[in-house]
Image (cartoon, rainbow, N blue to C red):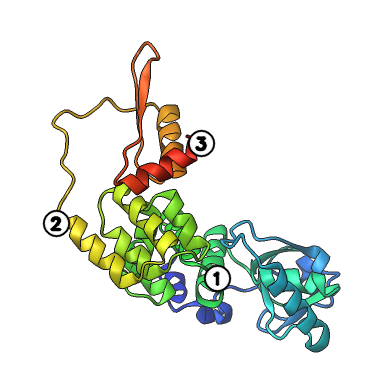
Amino acid sequence: MSAEKRNALGRGLSALLNDSVNVLPNKNEYAGSPEVSSMGSVNEIRIAEIEVNPFQPRTDFDADSLAELADSIKVQGLIQPITVRRVSAHRYQLISGERRLRASKLAGLTTIPAYIRTANDQQMLEMALIENIQRENLNAIEVALSFQRMIDECNLKQEELGERVSKNRSTVTNYLRLLKLPPTIQASIRDGQISMGHARALITINDSTKQLYIHKLITKDGLSVRKVEELARDLQRSPVKKEGKQPEPLSFQVQKIQDDLASKFSTKVKLKLNSQGKGSIEIPFLSEDDLSRILEMLDW
Protein backbone atom coordinates (compact mmCIF):
# COMPACT_ATOMS: atom_id res chain seq x y z
CA MET A 1 0.00 0.00 0.00
CA SER A 2 1.39 3.44 -0.91
CA ALA A 3 2.15 6.06 1.74
CA GLU A 4 -0.65 8.22 0.33
CA LYS A 5 -3.28 5.52 0.80
CA ARG A 6 -1.92 4.53 4.23
CA ASN A 7 -2.28 8.14 5.39
CA ALA A 8 -5.83 8.23 4.08
CA LEU A 9 -6.67 5.12 6.10
CA GLY A 10 -5.22 6.75 9.17
CA ARG A 11 -7.62 9.69 8.89
CA GLY A 12 -10.58 7.42 9.66
CA LEU A 13 -13.69 6.20 7.90
CA SER A 14 -14.86 9.60 6.67
CA ALA A 15 -11.59 10.03 4.80
CA LEU A 16 -11.98 6.57 3.30
CA LEU A 17 -15.50 7.27 2.06
CA ASN A 18 -14.42 10.51 0.40
CA ASP A 19 -10.97 9.43 -0.77
CA SER A 20 -10.70 10.35 -4.44
CA VAL A 21 -7.74 8.02 -4.96
CA ASN A 22 -10.07 5.01 -5.27
CA VAL A 23 -12.17 5.37 -8.41
CA LEU A 24 -14.49 3.06 -10.28
CA PRO A 25 -13.16 1.25 -13.34
CA ASN A 26 -14.21 2.27 -16.82
CA LYS A 27 -18.01 2.74 -16.98
CA ASN A 28 -18.19 0.67 -20.16
CA GLU A 29 -17.14 -2.36 -18.14
CA TYR A 30 -20.41 -2.13 -16.22
CA ALA A 31 -22.81 -1.35 -19.02
CA GLY A 32 -26.36 -2.40 -18.21
CA SER A 33 -26.52 -0.86 -14.71
CA PRO A 34 -28.17 2.54 -15.34
CA GLU A 35 -29.13 2.91 -11.66
CA VAL A 36 -25.48 3.34 -10.66
CA SER A 37 -24.06 6.86 -10.96
CA SER A 38 -20.73 8.32 -9.88
CA MET A 39 -18.95 6.92 -6.85
CA GLY A 40 -19.27 10.13 -4.83
CA SER A 41 -23.08 9.96 -4.83
CA VAL A 42 -25.59 7.62 -3.19
CA ASN A 43 -26.81 4.87 -5.52
CA GLU A 44 -29.87 2.64 -5.31
CA ILE A 45 -28.73 -0.95 -5.89
CA ARG A 46 -30.59 -4.25 -5.77
CA ILE A 47 -30.35 -6.07 -2.44
CA ALA A 48 -30.30 -9.42 -4.25
CA GLU A 49 -26.98 -8.40 -5.86
CA ILE A 50 -25.22 -7.82 -2.51
CA GLU A 51 -23.21 -10.56 -0.82
CA VAL A 52 -22.29 -10.48 2.87
CA ASN A 53 -18.88 -9.13 3.82
CA PRO A 54 -16.63 -12.12 4.73
CA PHE A 55 -14.60 -9.82 7.01
CA GLN A 56 -17.59 -8.74 9.15
CA PRO A 57 -16.32 -8.73 12.77
CA ARG A 58 -19.78 -8.69 14.33
CA THR A 59 -21.58 -12.03 14.54
CA ASP A 60 -24.38 -11.25 17.01
CA PHE A 61 -27.36 -9.17 15.86
CA ASP A 62 -30.22 -8.63 18.30
CA ALA A 63 -33.51 -9.77 16.73
CA ASP A 64 -35.66 -7.19 18.54
CA SER A 65 -33.30 -4.36 17.57
CA LEU A 66 -33.36 -5.48 13.93
CA ALA A 67 -37.17 -5.60 13.99
CA GLU A 68 -37.33 -2.06 15.40
CA LEU A 69 -34.98 -0.78 12.69
CA ALA A 70 -37.00 -2.60 10.03
CA ASP A 71 -40.19 -0.89 11.25
CA SER A 72 -38.44 2.48 11.12
CA ILE A 73 -37.21 1.78 7.57
CA LYS A 74 -40.77 0.93 6.47
CA VAL A 75 -41.95 4.35 7.64
CA GLN A 76 -38.99 6.65 6.98
CA GLY A 77 -36.76 4.67 4.62
CA LEU A 78 -33.07 3.98 5.25
CA ILE A 79 -31.45 7.23 6.36
CA GLN A 80 -27.81 6.09 6.42
CA PRO A 81 -26.62 4.33 3.23
CA ILE A 82 -24.55 1.17 3.41
CA THR A 83 -21.11 0.89 1.76
CA VAL A 84 -20.33 -1.81 -0.81
CA ARG A 85 -17.51 -2.88 -3.10
CA ARG A 86 -18.34 -3.50 -6.73
CA VAL A 87 -17.22 -6.97 -7.82
CA SER A 88 -18.81 -7.15 -11.28
CA ALA A 89 -21.60 -5.54 -13.28
CA HIS A 90 -24.38 -6.92 -11.08
CA ARG A 91 -22.59 -8.13 -7.96
CA TYR A 92 -21.50 -6.19 -4.89
CA GLN A 93 -19.77 -7.12 -1.65
CA LEU A 94 -20.80 -5.44 1.61
CA ILE A 95 -18.10 -3.34 3.31
CA SER A 96 -20.14 -1.86 6.16
CA GLY A 97 -23.77 -1.72 7.26
CA GLU A 98 -24.77 -5.38 7.67
CA ARG A 99 -27.30 -4.48 10.38
CA ARG A 100 -28.92 -1.95 8.03
CA LEU A 101 -28.89 -4.49 5.19
CA ARG A 102 -30.55 -7.18 7.33
CA ALA A 103 -33.19 -4.76 8.57
CA SER A 104 -33.90 -3.57 5.02
CA LYS A 105 -34.50 -7.19 3.98
CA LEU A 106 -36.91 -7.59 6.91
CA ALA A 107 -38.67 -4.41 5.82
CA GLY A 108 -39.24 -5.97 2.39
CA LEU A 109 -37.03 -3.59 0.40
CA THR A 110 -35.71 -4.78 -2.94
CA THR A 111 -33.21 -1.95 -3.40
CA ILE A 112 -31.06 -0.06 -0.90
CA PRO A 113 -29.10 3.23 -0.95
CA ALA A 114 -25.35 2.61 -1.01
CA TYR A 115 -21.96 4.19 -1.46
CA ILE A 116 -19.94 2.19 -4.00
CA ARG A 117 -16.24 1.71 -3.29
CA THR A 118 -13.30 -0.08 -4.86
CA ALA A 119 -11.06 -1.72 -2.27
CA ASN A 120 -8.70 -4.64 -1.94
CA ASP A 121 -9.16 -7.27 0.77
CA GLN A 122 -6.97 -5.52 3.35
CA GLN A 123 -8.85 -2.25 2.83
CA MET A 124 -12.11 -4.22 3.08
CA LEU A 125 -11.09 -5.67 6.42
CA GLU A 126 -9.82 -2.37 7.82
CA MET A 127 -12.91 -0.47 6.69
CA ALA A 128 -15.32 -3.08 8.10
CA LEU A 129 -13.51 -3.25 11.43
CA ILE A 130 -13.14 0.52 11.79
CA GLU A 131 -16.77 1.13 10.88
CA ASN A 132 -17.99 -1.40 13.43
CA ILE A 133 -15.67 -0.25 16.22
CA GLN A 134 -16.61 3.40 15.76
CA ARG A 135 -20.31 3.12 14.97
CA GLU A 136 -21.69 -0.08 16.49
CA ASN A 137 -22.35 -0.89 20.13
CA LEU A 138 -19.90 -3.79 20.24
CA ASN A 139 -19.24 -5.51 23.55
CA ALA A 140 -15.69 -5.33 24.91
CA ILE A 141 -14.73 -8.82 23.71
CA GLU A 142 -15.92 -8.08 20.16
CA VAL A 143 -13.85 -4.87 20.21
CA ALA A 144 -10.82 -6.79 21.51
CA LEU A 145 -11.20 -9.45 18.79
CA SER A 146 -11.53 -6.72 16.15
CA PHE A 147 -8.36 -5.06 17.42
CA GLN A 148 -6.51 -8.38 17.37
CA ARG A 149 -7.65 -9.08 13.81
CA MET A 150 -6.39 -5.67 12.66
CA ILE A 151 -3.00 -6.42 14.25
CA ASP A 152 -2.76 -9.98 12.91
CA GLU A 153 -4.36 -9.65 9.47
CA CYS A 154 -3.47 -6.04 8.58
CA ASN A 155 0.07 -6.21 10.03
CA LEU A 156 -0.48 -3.19 12.26
CA LYS A 157 1.41 -2.21 15.39
CA GLN A 158 -0.55 -1.08 18.43
CA GLU A 159 0.36 2.56 17.80
CA GLU A 160 -0.87 2.32 14.19
CA LEU A 161 -4.05 0.58 15.34
CA GLY A 162 -4.67 3.37 17.84
CA GLU A 163 -4.38 5.94 15.04
CA ARG A 164 -6.84 4.00 12.88
CA VAL A 165 -9.54 3.85 15.57
CA SER A 166 -8.75 7.19 17.29
CA LYS A 167 -7.79 5.59 20.61
CA ASN A 168 -4.58 5.85 22.61
CA ARG A 169 -2.24 2.89 22.96
CA SER A 170 -3.15 2.18 26.60
CA THR A 171 -6.82 1.79 25.66
CA VAL A 172 -5.93 -0.59 22.83
CA THR A 173 -3.66 -2.55 25.19
CA ASN A 174 -6.41 -2.86 27.84
CA TYR A 175 -8.81 -4.32 25.27
CA LEU A 176 -6.24 -6.77 23.92
CA ARG A 177 -5.41 -8.00 27.45
CA LEU A 178 -9.01 -9.16 27.81
CA LEU A 179 -8.22 -11.96 25.36
CA LYS A 180 -5.69 -13.38 27.87
CA LEU A 181 -8.42 -13.99 30.47
CA PRO A 182 -9.89 -17.53 30.82
CA PRO A 183 -12.72 -18.32 28.37
CA THR A 184 -15.31 -18.36 31.18
CA ILE A 185 -14.49 -14.77 32.11
CA GLN A 186 -14.42 -13.65 28.47
CA ALA A 187 -17.91 -15.10 28.04
CA SER A 188 -19.14 -13.14 31.08
CA ILE A 189 -17.74 -9.91 29.61
CA ARG A 190 -19.35 -10.66 26.26
CA ASP A 191 -22.72 -11.40 27.87
CA GLY A 192 -22.63 -8.33 30.11
CA GLN A 193 -22.44 -10.31 33.37
CA ILE A 194 -19.35 -8.39 34.49
CA SER A 195 -18.23 -4.90 33.52
CA MET A 196 -15.07 -3.67 31.83
CA GLY A 197 -14.02 -2.33 35.25
CA HIS A 198 -14.29 -5.81 36.76
CA ALA A 199 -12.31 -7.21 33.84
CA ARG A 200 -9.50 -4.66 34.21
CA ALA A 201 -9.18 -5.58 37.90
CA LEU A 202 -9.07 -9.31 37.10
CA ILE A 203 -6.36 -8.75 34.50
CA THR A 204 -3.98 -7.53 37.22
CA ILE A 205 -4.13 -10.98 38.86
CA ASN A 206 -1.47 -13.23 37.34
CA ASP A 207 -2.95 -16.57 38.46
CA SER A 208 -5.92 -17.87 36.44
CA THR A 209 -7.17 -19.95 39.39
CA LYS A 210 -7.57 -16.81 41.47
CA GLN A 211 -9.07 -14.95 38.52
CA LEU A 212 -11.74 -17.62 38.17
CA TYR A 213 -12.41 -17.70 41.91
CA ILE A 214 -12.96 -13.94 42.13
CA HIS A 215 -15.00 -14.05 38.94
CA LYS A 216 -17.27 -16.57 40.66
CA LEU A 217 -17.67 -14.19 43.61
CA ILE A 218 -18.53 -11.31 41.25
CA THR A 219 -21.32 -13.22 39.51
CA LYS A 220 -22.58 -14.87 42.73
CA ASP A 221 -22.36 -12.02 45.25
CA GLY A 222 -22.39 -8.98 42.96
CA LEU A 223 -19.02 -7.61 44.05
CA SER A 224 -18.37 -3.99 43.12
CA VAL A 225 -15.42 -2.99 40.95
CA ARG A 226 -13.75 -1.36 43.97
CA LYS A 227 -14.08 -4.56 46.02
CA VAL A 228 -12.55 -6.61 43.20
CA GLU A 229 -9.67 -4.14 42.94
CA GLU A 230 -9.06 -4.55 46.71
CA LEU A 231 -9.07 -8.35 46.43
CA ALA A 232 -6.71 -8.16 43.46
CA ARG A 233 -4.25 -6.02 45.44
CA ASP A 234 -4.41 -8.43 48.40
CA LEU A 235 -3.73 -11.41 46.15
CA GLN A 236 -0.79 -9.66 44.49
CA ARG A 237 0.85 -9.33 47.93
CA SER A 238 0.83 -13.13 48.34
CA PRO A 239 2.05 -14.55 45.01
CA VAL A 240 1.71 -18.23 44.23
CA LYS A 241 4.86 -20.24 44.89
CA LYS A 242 6.37 -21.82 41.80
CA GLU A 243 7.42 -25.45 41.81
CA GLY A 244 11.10 -26.16 41.44
CA LYS A 245 10.71 -28.78 38.70
CA GLN A 246 8.52 -27.98 35.75
CA PRO A 247 6.27 -30.81 34.47
CA GLU A 248 6.55 -32.22 30.98
CA PRO A 249 4.46 -30.28 28.46
CA LEU A 250 1.05 -31.80 27.74
CA SER A 251 -0.07 -32.83 24.29
CA PHE A 252 -2.56 -30.61 22.50
CA GLN A 253 -5.43 -33.05 23.13
CA VAL A 254 -4.67 -33.41 26.85
CA GLN A 255 -4.16 -29.66 27.24
CA LYS A 256 -7.58 -29.03 25.69
CA ILE A 257 -9.21 -31.50 28.10
CA GLN A 258 -7.48 -29.76 31.01
CA ASP A 259 -8.62 -26.32 29.80
CA ASP A 260 -12.20 -27.55 29.32
CA LEU A 261 -12.26 -28.96 32.87
CA ALA A 262 -10.85 -25.70 34.24
CA SER A 263 -13.65 -23.76 32.52
CA LYS A 264 -16.29 -26.21 33.77
CA PHE A 265 -15.19 -26.04 37.42
CA SER A 266 -14.04 -22.38 37.35
CA THR A 267 -10.72 -23.35 38.87
CA LYS A 268 -7.30 -24.47 37.65
CA VAL A 269 -7.35 -28.21 36.98
CA LYS A 270 -4.14 -30.26 36.76
CA LEU A 271 -4.23 -33.31 34.54
CA LYS A 272 -1.24 -35.65 34.77
CA LEU A 273 -0.65 -38.44 32.26
CA ASN A 274 2.28 -40.83 31.93
CA SER A 275 3.55 -42.72 28.90
CA GLN A 276 1.45 -45.77 29.83
CA GLY A 277 -1.75 -43.74 29.67
CA LYS A 278 -2.23 -43.65 33.46
CA GLY A 279 -2.62 -40.45 35.39
CA SER A 280 -4.71 -38.32 37.69
CA ILE A 281 -6.93 -35.24 37.75
CA GLU A 282 -6.35 -32.67 40.50
CA ILE A 283 -9.06 -30.09 41.23
CA PRO A 284 -7.91 -27.57 43.88
CA PHE A 285 -10.36 -25.53 45.98
CA LEU A 286 -9.85 -22.25 47.80
CA SER A 287 -12.33 -22.61 50.68
CA GLU A 288 -14.94 -24.95 52.18
CA ASP A 289 -17.63 -23.14 50.18
CA ASP A 290 -15.58 -23.62 47.04
CA LEU A 291 -15.24 -27.34 47.84
CA SER A 292 -19.01 -27.60 48.32
CA ARG A 293 -19.54 -25.91 44.97
CA ILE A 294 -17.25 -28.40 43.20
CA LEU A 295 -18.86 -31.37 44.95
CA GLU A 296 -22.31 -30.17 43.85
CA MET A 297 -21.08 -30.01 40.26
CA LEU A 298 -19.81 -33.58 40.62
CA ASP A 299 -23.26 -34.53 41.93
CA TRP A 300 -21.60 -35.79 45.15
Nearest to the observer: residue 34 or residue 141: 141
Q: Which label sits on residue 67? A: none
Q: Nearer the viewer, mark 2 or mark 3?
A: 3
Q: Which residue is mark 1?
A: 132
Say if mark 2 contacts mark 3, CB within 8 Å: no
Q: Which residue is located at x 34 percent, y 70 percent?
A: 225
Q: Which residue is located at x 83 percent, y 72 percent?
A: 33
Q: Examine the rendered structure and indicate whether residue 6 appears above or below residue 14.
A: above
Residue type at mark 2 is: Arg
Residue type at mark 1 is: Asn
Q: CA distance from mark 2 to mark 3?
A: 35 Å
Residue type at mark 3 is: Asp
Q: CA distance from mark 3 to mark 1?
A: 44 Å
User: SS class of the residue under badge 1?
Assistant: helix
Q: Position of residue 88 (x, y in %)?
A: 75, 61
Q: How many residues crowd around disc 2 within 10 Å: few (fewer than 14), some, or many (20 or more)?
A: few
Q: Position of residue 252 (x, y in %)?
A: 42, 30
Q: Which label sits on residue 299? A: 3
User: SS class of the residue under badge 2?
Assistant: loop
Q: Position of residue 169 (x, y in %)?
A: 31, 70
Q: Which label sits on residue 237? A: 2
Image-based side of 192 in relation to 111, left or right = left
Q: Nearer the viewer, mark 3 or mark 1?
A: 3
